[in-house]
Each structure stands twice: as C-alpha cells, then as structure tokens.
C-alpha cells in the first residue's frame, strides 16, 4: 500500500468520516477515485453479510464528479466479489429505501448534500437502510489503512457483476406516494418546488403532479455544476419570491440530495425543520400516532419548539447534531418522529433516514385535509431569537481546546442563565466552528454572540 493511503494529509489523523459520511473536494484527498475505490474494497470486507454473493446499491446526486466516484465504487466492490446495483441520480432517502427493497447488503450514496458542486462525499447504509454507526465506520477506516486488502480479493470466477436498475426512480416515486393518505388529493393546491438542481429534480415534481398538485418547479435543470448554486434549501429567497409572484399555497425547497427540506408559507415566511416537527407532532398527537410522547431533535432546535411541545404535554429529547444520532435515540427509546432544524425530518413509520419528499408530503396532507393556509397551520410555534454563526478556521486548527475559548463559552452561558442557550461545536463536514446563541432578548444574544465569536476567531488564527 502506498504512503498516500497510510497517512492522512490533513495533519496525521486518519479519520475520514464526519457526521454524515466522508466528504471533501473532488479530486483532492481524500475524495480521489483511488482512495474511494479502496474504500469500497474495505467496506466490502467489513460489511460482508453471510456467505452469499453480497449486493450493493449505488446511487448519486447530480454532481459532475458523481460519474467518477460511481465508477470507482463499482470497481472496488466488484473486485471484492460484490454485485453492484446502479440506480443513477436519486435522493439519498431513495437509496435507503432501495437498499431495503432490493434486499441488498449495503447501500452507498455519492453526494456532498448541500455543499457546492466541487465537493462530493460517500454515505453508507446497512441492509435496513440505516446509516452506519461510528464504530463500523471506524472499522472500515482501519481496514482501509491497515488491512491487507489484496489477500481478501476473490478468485477470478467470483468477481462481482454490475447491473443497472432501470425502474429505481419509479419504485421510489410509488414509495413516496404510498406515504400520502389515499383519501386525499392535492387538487387545487399550487406548489412552488425548488429541487436545488439536485437529486430530486425528476422524482419530486412527478410525485406532486401525480397526487394532483399544480407544480411550479425551479432548480430542476441540473448540468453537473449548478447543484445548490443559488437554489435549494440554503437559498430560500428563490421560493419566497416565486411563491409571492405566483400566489402559491406553499413553497418546498430541498437540498442537493433531498434528505432535508424547508418550506415557505403563502406569505413568504420560511418554515424550517422545527416548524415541520411542530406541525407533524401536533397532528400525530391528535391522531394518536405519536409514539414516545415526544419528539427527538438535536441541540440546535429552537427553544420555542421545546416550549410548544411542553405546553401540549410532550417532551423534546435532544441529541448531538446529526440525523444518525436522532435515529439512534428514536429507535432505542421508542419514538417515531424526530429530526433537525436544518430540515432532516425522520418519520420512522415511513423511512429510516431524513426524507425531504416524504416530509413535505406529510405537511401537504395537513394542508389538503385542514383546508387552512400554511401560515395558520404553522403559526402555533413561536420561535425565540436565534443567531447562527459559521466561523472558518485553518485546517488542523482546534480553537475549542483553548482555555480562552472555554472561558468565553462559560461566560456566555452565565450571561444568559435560564433565559437562553449557547452551543459551540466544530462542524463534522467543514473546517468551521458553528456558534449558536438563542434567547428571549435579541439585543442580548447579539452581544453575547459577537463577543464569543471574536474570541474564537482570535484563537483560531493564533493556533
């Protein structure tokens, strides 16, 4: 094995996986075709399931580099005796669903989610369509860097094969439609749909049209380099303007791989994952389908959501950031609704990961059945002011270990006391420190956030 595979060029650490798979700039370490091929080999060894020839579902979003990594994964898995089922460009939740539906042993999604086109990433799913736990990802890394992969390769007659699943998109379309109540239609509902020029550009408009909606699609013309570029859930201005221009009933925006969704009401107000969780929780409680007497979210969810749920006799259980941790808590403690403020919503009765399209259909069902404007359906949630800052840091820098930063965080928490919250964490996908400050006083949290961010920037530049 060459030195390139033995040493991580980011400072000696071998950790490849973050909070949502492996991610980086395409054609730059670690997102090179050579390493991705060997990653597939290591995954084939670690995720080996029984004595039968294993099968892996491989999907991708619309990034130009997706072709390269799809081929690298295929080569790596096939040389280890694993059959590859290629499904083309589909949302991440579609890969989770198809891994289960096709009785595959592994699922792989090639995507960098909401990142620009020049980034890409790899996400793995187990046979049940669940993201791999940290321990399994760590074992894949160990085998990749330390294992003798060549000795694990089968004899020539046991090399794997590749198959293209031509009806994969249609299967996912039907899956999504089955999550929508049969008694309802979306007739008379005008929807602005922003597909971020990403993986949902074909399936999402089809699902909504087949359910009867009038669909005004934007961000539905991917060219390999325009994914998330001014469109999608990170750029809500597009749906705000289009909703107001067309007098639509609702706007829906996905990210590049459509595992997250945000909404826009008829007045142009953006509704994030906390709003979606609130609407779903109230509806599910009323219909006696909410399990666990509460909702699972992350430390990022707004204090207003916690207060709303408490007022209805429900709890808000918080986990660390990452929908895999939300899912783990849900399954361990018996919840069926959870998600993230960013729009990853897990409806465990339907799918095992964040599914932007299924989540949107859940809210559209409320719109169709209640016959009330989206602004009224979402109006019960009263958010407290919340500020989010993303502070770029030099690669390898660790300002959070600085005594000055720890002292600044403690001071910020003391200043807010029980009138707000402070959360500081290192991003699992980018070289950034994420700072969240929320509280009842906008002026106060602005002061606290400004002082805290200043200390973090100073320590990051000094380290």
Image (cartoon, rainbow, N blue to C red):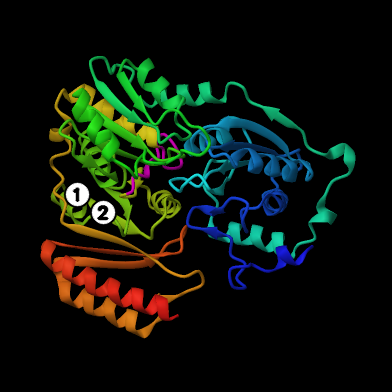
Q: Nearer the viewer, residue 352 or 214?
A: 214
Q: Position of residue 64 (x, y in %)?
A: 57, 39
Q: Position of residue 424 (x, y in %)?
A: 33, 68
Q: Residue at x 69, y 39 (%)?
A: 71
Verify whether residue 347 appears in magenta. Answer: yes
Q: How far, Cα to Cα, is label 2 from label 1?
A: 7 Å
Q: Farthest bottom residue?
A: 403
> What's the magenta bit mostly, secondary-structure-wise?
loop
Disc number for residue 316: 2
Q: Is residue 264 left or right of residue 99?
A: left
Q: Residue at x 17, y 38 (%)?
A: 378
- Quarter where residue 60 is shown: top right
Verify whether residue 146 appears in magenta. Answer: no
- What's the magenta region? 342-355
Q: Residue at x 35, y 73 (%)?
A: 457
Q: How many marks?
A: 2
Look at mark 1 in the image and give the residue it sits on: 309
Q: Is residue 184 above or below residue 2?
A: above
Q: Is residue 385 above or below residue 196?
A: below
């Amino acid at each position: 094995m060459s030195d390139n595979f033995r040493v991580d060029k980011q400072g000696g650490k071998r950790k490849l996986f973050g909070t949502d798979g492996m991610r980086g700039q395409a054609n730059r370490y670690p997102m090179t075709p050579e390493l991705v091929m060997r990653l597939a080999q290591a995954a084939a060894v670690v995720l080996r399931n029984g004595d039968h020839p294993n099968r892996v579902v491989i999907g991708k979003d619309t990034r130009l580099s997706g072709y390269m990594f799809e081929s690298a994964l295929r080569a790596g898995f096939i040389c280890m005796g694993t059959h590859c089922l290629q499904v083309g460009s589909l949302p991440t939740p579609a890969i989770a669903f198809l891994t289960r539906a096709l009785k595959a042993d592994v699922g792989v999604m090639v995507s960098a989610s909401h990142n620009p086109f020049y980034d890409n990433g790899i996400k793995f799913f187990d046979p049940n369509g669940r993201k791999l736990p940290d321990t399994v990802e760590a074992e894949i890394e160990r085998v990749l860097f330390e294992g003798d992969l060549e000795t694990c390769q089968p004899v020539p007659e046991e090399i794997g094969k590749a198959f293209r699943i031509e009806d994969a998109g249609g299967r996912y379309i039907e899956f999504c439609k089955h999550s929508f109540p049969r008694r309802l239609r979306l007739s008379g509902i005008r929807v602005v749909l922003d597909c971020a020029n990403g993986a949902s550009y074909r399936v999402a408009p089809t699902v909504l049209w087949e359910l009867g909606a009038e669909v005004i699609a934007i961000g539905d013309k991917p060219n390999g380099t325009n994914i998330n570029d001014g469109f999608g859930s990170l750029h809500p201005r597009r749906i705000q303007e289009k909703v107001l221009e067309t007098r639509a009933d609702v706007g829906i925006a996905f990210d590049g791989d459509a595992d997250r969704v945000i909404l826009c009401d008829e007045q142009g107000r953006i509704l994030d994952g906390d709003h979606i969780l609130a609407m779903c929780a109230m509806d599910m409680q009323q219909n006696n389908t909410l399990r666990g007497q509460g909702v699972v979210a992350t430390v990022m969810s707004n204090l207003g959501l916690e207060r709303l749920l408490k007022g209805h006799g429900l709890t808000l259980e918080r986990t660390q950031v990452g929908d895999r941790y939300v899912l783990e808590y849900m399954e361990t403690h018996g919840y069926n609704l959870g998600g993230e403020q960013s729009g990853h919503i897990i409806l465990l009765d339907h799918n095992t990961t964040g599914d932007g399209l299924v989540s949107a259909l859940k809210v559209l069902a409320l719109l169709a059945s209640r016959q009330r404007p989206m602004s009224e359906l979402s109006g019960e949630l009263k958010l407290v002011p919340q500020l989010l800052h993303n502070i770029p840091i030099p690669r390898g820098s660790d300002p959070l270990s600085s005594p000055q930063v720890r002292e600044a965080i403690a001071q910020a928490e003391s200043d807010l006391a029980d009138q707000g919250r402070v959360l500081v964490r290192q991003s699992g996908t980018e070289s950034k420190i994420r700072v969240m400050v929320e509280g009842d006083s906008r002026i106060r949290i602005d002061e606290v956030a400004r002082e805290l961010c200043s200390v973090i920037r100073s320590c990051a530049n000094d380290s």
